[in-house]
Amino acid sequence: MTIFYIAGSGIKPGKTSFASSFRTYLSKNEKKVNILKPFTFFSQSSDPDMNYLSRNNSNTNLSYEPLVLSQELEITEEMISKVSDIIKLSSDNADHTIIEGINEFEENTSSSPIPLLIDKLNAKVILIIRGSENIDLNLIENTISVYRNNIKLILINRTPKYMIPTVKNSFIENSQIQYYDLPIDIIPEDRTMLSPSVSEIGSFLNAKFPINDDISELIEKLNTPIEYFMIGGWSLDSGIHVFSKRNNKAVIVKGDRPDLQMAALETSTSCLILTNGQEPIQYVVQHAIKKQIPILAVDESTQEIMNNINEFPWENTEMTNIKSIQFGNLLEKYCQETSLATILEN
């Protein structure tokens, strides 16, 4: 069994996204793959990433209790021993095991027992870095030097597109990192990966779902990402013409405007958000079911809902199958052809 350890640096660098897409890549040859997240800041039931990863493991019966860490990140030898036991459980029914690590370990890598665990497991390390102008090159170089015998790939993820030349120049061409002779790939920011799902926005707004919950096609659509928010009624142009300017959007419209609601349903819409405490008329409901577009109903006004959406925790959107597929597309588009293959060969 091959073990991969996903290390991270920076706020939300994208370890879960990579782990999920990498599992798909490894599974193409009918290999059984498990992803473990042995460390968490949440309980098992409240860690959305862990719940998502567990549901998609090859061994669906693999059950373990993650180690809940405090903000001080004190990791003991006893914890490392427990993690080793968890990995042994995974090896019973998998060709590959992917371990998602914790970013903050890299701040004190030299004194952390994690490198010892990696050496013991002979794990291959993939380092995921949040692309920004504030990348700490000294920290990254220290991390690479500690993991040197095990690190196989560096992925600079979530890099704003306008910053890619700067990151490439400072990180790859003008630092000591280039002398480690490691594959380095840069992945740009992507709107789908940053977007909340219909379900997340509905929960955040305490919205009601007027359409019957047992319609399975609509339940699946609750994982659709919302990439844009549009407000109905602010234009003299045709509603269909206005709403067709954006795909994968939530349209926020008063509950007593079925004309605008119908127009939005004729375009690429992730959901309708009906304001002012009014639920849709039956004709709109039937059309939404036909188009498989969820409807959310809220008591607040349109202005209040827009203010609430501005407070949404955008850095903490949940992982979904749609995002996993999208990140796989990004890897295929922006990574060197040999990067992932090299990880398996070495």
Image (cartoon, rainbow, N blue to C red):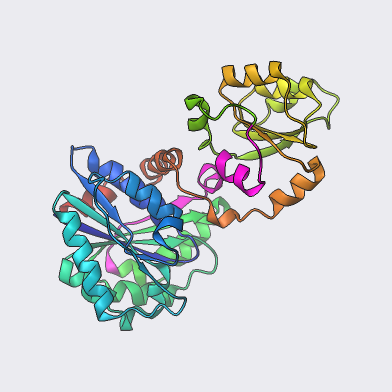
Q: Is residue 76 above or below residue 123?
A: below
Q: How many marks?
A: 0
Residue drawn 16% across the image and 66% down it? 122
Relative side of 219 to 17, left or right: right
Residue drawn 72% across the image and 39% down it? 298
Relative side of 137 to 254, left or right: left
Q: Quadrant of residue 184?
A: bottom left
Q: Nearer the viewer, residue 229 or 337?
A: 229
Residue 278: x and y, percent? 77, 32
Residue 66: x and y, percent? 33, 64
Residue drawn 72% across the image and 36% down it? 230
Relative side of 3 to 51, left or right: left
Residue 245: x and y, percent? 68, 28
Regarding residue 188, the answer to whether it shows in the image is yes
Classify the position of the C terminus by image quarter.
bottom left
Residue at the extreme right: 236
Regarding residue 149, the answer to whether it shows in the image is no
Q: Nearer the viewer, residue 251 or 142?
A: 251
Is 188 a magenta residue? yes
Relative side of 179 to 345, left or right: right
The region drawn magenta spans 180-209
Q: Nearer the viewer, residue 143 or 67?
A: 67
Q: Is residue 28 above or below residue 310?
A: above
Residue 127: x and y, percent? 35, 62
Classify the position of the N terminus by image quarter.
bottom left
Q: Nearer the viewer, residue 41 or 306?
A: 41
Residue drawn 56% across the image and 23% down it? 292
Is 6 a magenta residue? no
Q: Is residue 213 above or below residue 149?
A: above
